[in-house]
């Protein structure tokens, strides 16, 4: 690690606009979240200066597709993440929104963290807007969030609920048992795990919501008893197969 830090510092003597050097220093050399924030902020500034102003406009919409933008995007993602850690969620949300404007394809996956933030803020309009911006998203994360929003809508979303339950469970059948309190979530030490694994992170956004859990807020918002919950019926049906 010492050699990595030394090389990063050397890179900055050669080119002060080397944003990736600041990213590496933030990850490997900082001794506090505040120092991490400051180093990522320097990386964002350096990365922005390394890109011509006219290129920002030209590249918008496909930003990640141009290699010279990636150090800037990495630094900005890091800055947003540490701001979130420091409790400045609104600033973090601003960064994530700007990054999605620059690169709607979201190669970095910041939409998932943004969705977690919106769930924590309990902002149904913005949650729905973000979900609708990615209509072809088929991850458990996205489908279960859609499901919980529909259930909160009550009768208005009832017609779509049954089909969406099946779609969501096809991506990860273990989530409903956690949501209705039958099982405790098992946290994985890795973001990646085999498909269908019981230790897969159920949906990280549901661990950060109001009253301790956004998933509980959305789930309870449906005002359906657990025993009569549509997911309970689907779970029973699967157990009897």
Image (cartoon, rainbow, N blue to C red):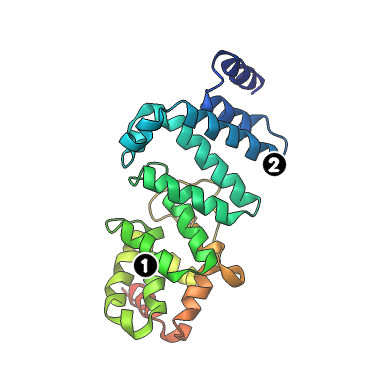
In which quadrant of the rendered view does residue 207 lie?
Answer: bottom right
Q: Is residue 181 visible?
A: no
Question: On the picture, is 152 further left or further right than 27?
Answer: left
Task: Tell me residue 226's x, y (percent).
Answer: 47, 83
Secondary element under disc 2, as helix, strand or loop, is helix
Task: Tell me residue 27's x, y (percent).
Answer: 61, 33
Residue that badge 2 annotates: 34
Residue at the location (47% across, 55% down)?
114
Residue depth check, mark 1 versus mark 2: number of the one nearer the observer = 2
Of the 4 image quadrants, the one containing the C terminus is bottom left
- Number of marks drawn: 2
Residue at the location (67% across, 21% down)?
2
In which quadrant of the rendered view does residue 56 lie?
Answer: top left
Question: 233 or 104: nearer the eye?
Answer: 104
Question: 49 or 9: nearer the eye?
Answer: 49
Residue that badge 1 annotates: 146
Question: On the picture, is 6 further left or further right than 196?
Answer: right
Residue at the location (48% across, 36% down)?
74
Q: Is residue 220 visible?
A: yes
In which quadrant of the rendered view does residue 210 lie?
Answer: bottom right
Q: Residues within 10 Å of mark 1 (few under 14, many from 20)?
A: many
Task: Tell me residue 194's x, y (percent).
Answer: 41, 48
Q: Residues within 10 Å of mark 2 (few under 14, many from 20)?
A: some
Up/down of 102 relative to 224, above or below = above
Task: Tell me residue 197's x, y (percent).
Answer: 43, 54
Question: On the picture, is 40 further left or further right than 135?
Answer: right
Secondary element under disc 1, as helix, strand or loop, is helix
């Amino acid at each position: 690690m010492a050699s990595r830090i030394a090389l990063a510092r050397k890179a900055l003597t050669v080119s002060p606009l080397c944003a990736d050097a600041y990213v590496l220093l933030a990850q490997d050399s900082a001794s506090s979240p505040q120092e991490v924030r400051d180093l990522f902020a320097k990386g964002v500034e350096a990365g922005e200066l390394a890109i011509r102003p006219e290129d920002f406009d030209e590249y918008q919409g496909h930003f990640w597709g141009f290699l010279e933008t990636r150090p800037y995007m990495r630094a900005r993602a890091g800055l947003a993440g540490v701001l979130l850690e420091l409790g400045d969620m609104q600033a973090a949300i601003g960064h994530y929104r700007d990054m999605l404007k620059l690169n709607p394809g979201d190669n970095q996956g910041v939409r998932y963290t943004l969705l977690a933030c919106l769930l924590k803020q309990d902002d149904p309009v913005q949650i729905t807007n973000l979900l609708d911006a990615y209509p072809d998203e088929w991850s458990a994360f996205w489908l279960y969030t859609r499901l919980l929003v529909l259930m909160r809508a009550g009768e208005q979303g009832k017609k779509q609920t049954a089909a969406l339950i099946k779609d969501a469970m096809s991506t990860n059948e273990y989530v409903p048992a956690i949501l209705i309190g039958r099982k405790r979530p098992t946290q994985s030490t890795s973001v990646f795990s085999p498909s269908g694994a019981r230790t897969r992170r159920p949906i990280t956004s549901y661990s950060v919501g109001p009253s301790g859990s956004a998933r509980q807020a959305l789930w309870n918002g449906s005002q359906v008893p657990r025993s009569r919950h549509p997911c309970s019926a689907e779970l029973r049906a699967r157990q009897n197969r």
